Amino acid sequence: MPPVPCDTRVLAVANQKGGVGKTTTTVNLATALAACGKRVLIVDMDPQGNASTGLGVSPDKRSQGVYQVLIQGLAMDEAESPTLVPGMAIVPSGVELSGAELELIDVDNREYRMRDAIDRVRGQYDFVLIDCPPALGLLTLNALVAADAVLVPLQAEFYALEGLSHLMRTIERVQRALNPKLSLQGVVLTMFDRRNNLCEMVAADVRGHLGEAVYQTVIPRNVRVSEAPSHGKPVLLYDMRCAGSQAYIRLAREILQRENDLAGEPALAS
């Protein structure tokens, strides 16, 4: 029996700064959403392919992926790879994607390639999470044009707000020129250490500037979260009980609760 069509929410997980937990958040939030019964697709737009590696997709199984979708027009459902997580698939990234920025320059409708591909699978998933590269080039632009909203992982460090301001200006430019529906889904504080006064100060500063756009859930620094990708698993499969896993479950619930509030649906059971 084919899956029942649903409203699909497309989120670009983006931050032009590297090392902020972007891929970790993509993989583990997607896993937590799937654990909540949602159908989830990850699109690995980062040429490094860390999301693919972190979900156990070996390089020899990436011959069909994001590059083929963007450059060759391959259908998304033909590029998907299954994962260990029930209800979750990934369109992987391979080494070819590193050259896609240059190849896209001469392609017609180059900014809309990913949007057109995702539009053809809308209704098959509840959430599509796009893991963006840590740069604001054509790959990230494709993700922002395809997305309904942007989820920003933000490390609680000294220059956090400066980088966030730059990203917000980019989102506004994409809104005006290419994707009027694009909005800020929210900001999630990552690698958070409550023993560090700077983390608390930055968190207060970010909440002061963005208010409710910043999720209440923060993702702590956690050794098990760091270990999980080397085993080809999300941390929720690697160690369900660790602090990082529990934080991503809370984040998924918070995101779903906000979605339900916007839709006027009943609250989630705790």
Image (cartoon, rainbow, N blue to C red):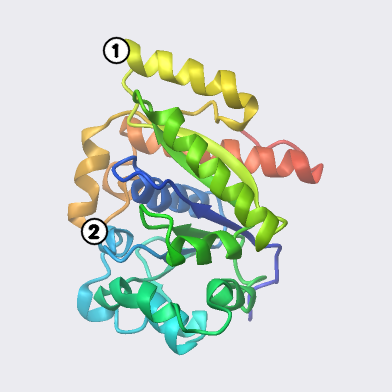
Residue drawn at 33 percent across, 71 percent down: 93
Give the amino acid at mark 1.
Arg
Q: Residue furthest right?
A: 264
The residue where tag 2 is placed is 232
Q: Is residue 84 above or below residue 216?
A: below
Q: Earlier in the sequence, mark 1 or mark 2?
A: 1
From the image, tell me which residue sits under label 1. 195
Q: Is residue 47 left or right of residue 265?
A: left
Q: Is residue 126 left or right of residue 83?
A: right
Give whichever of 86, 50 is nearer the camera.
50
Residue 239, located in which quarter of the rendered image?
Answer: top left
Q: Amino acid at mark 2?
A: Gly
Verify CB contact (< 8 Å) between mark 1 and mark 2. Answer: no
* Neighbours of disc 2 within 10 Å: few (<14), some (14-19), many (20+): many
Q: Is residue 191 above or below residue 147?
A: above
Which percent across, then down, holds residue 48?
Answer: 26, 63
